[in-house]
Amino acid sequence: MVITDSFGKLFNDGGELVAEGNCQIDHDRGNVTMRPLIDSSLMNRQRGVLRLVLDDGVEYPIDGGRIIRFRLNVPGVAPGPTYRLYFAGYDHLRTTAGGIS
């Protein structure tokens, strides 16, 4: 299992910043767990393919119709909203050293 911790910014197809925060990317399952700095209703209203850009410059296409909001309580971290994001077209993508291509 390959999980990467990073900081990411999520953009819609118009280039608008939808969310930003800490991310755990699960490359094997094709999903991201994001804890946004500010919880905004923008994430739940997005449709189509979004773009997740990580601090190291790697980008992932995200399926805007499959965003799931839940609360995560982790020891040592303040409870708060967390989002599960899924790579768009993940079944057609393959993992490479630089991310998904």
Image (cartoon, grey):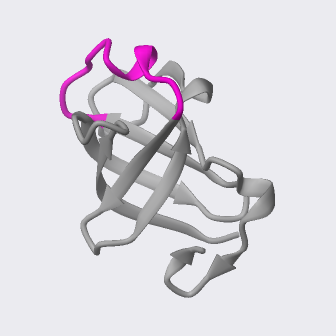
Decide which of 87, 75 is in the foreground and name it: 87
Between residue 56 and residue 15, name the one nearer to us: 15
Q: Residue furthest front?
A: 14
At 53% from the left and 45% from the top, the residue drawn is 62
Work out which quarter of the rendered image holds the C terminus and state it.
bottom right
Q: Residue at x 54, y 34 (%)?
A: 84
The segment highlighted magenta reads 36-48
- The front one of 70 and 15 is 15
Which of these two is toward me, 95 or 36?
A: 95
Quadrant including the N terminus:
bottom right
Residue 73's x, y, as percent?
43, 26
Q: Residue at x 26, y 17 (%)?
A: 40
Task: Give above or below for 57 relative to 60.
Answer: below
Please give left or right for residue 94 compared with residue 46 in the image: right
Which quadrant of the figure has residue 21?
top left
- Looking at the rendered structure, the number of numbered marks drawn on it comes to 0
Q: Locate residue 69, reporting x and y percent.
A: 50, 19
What is the x, y in percent for residue 53? 33, 58
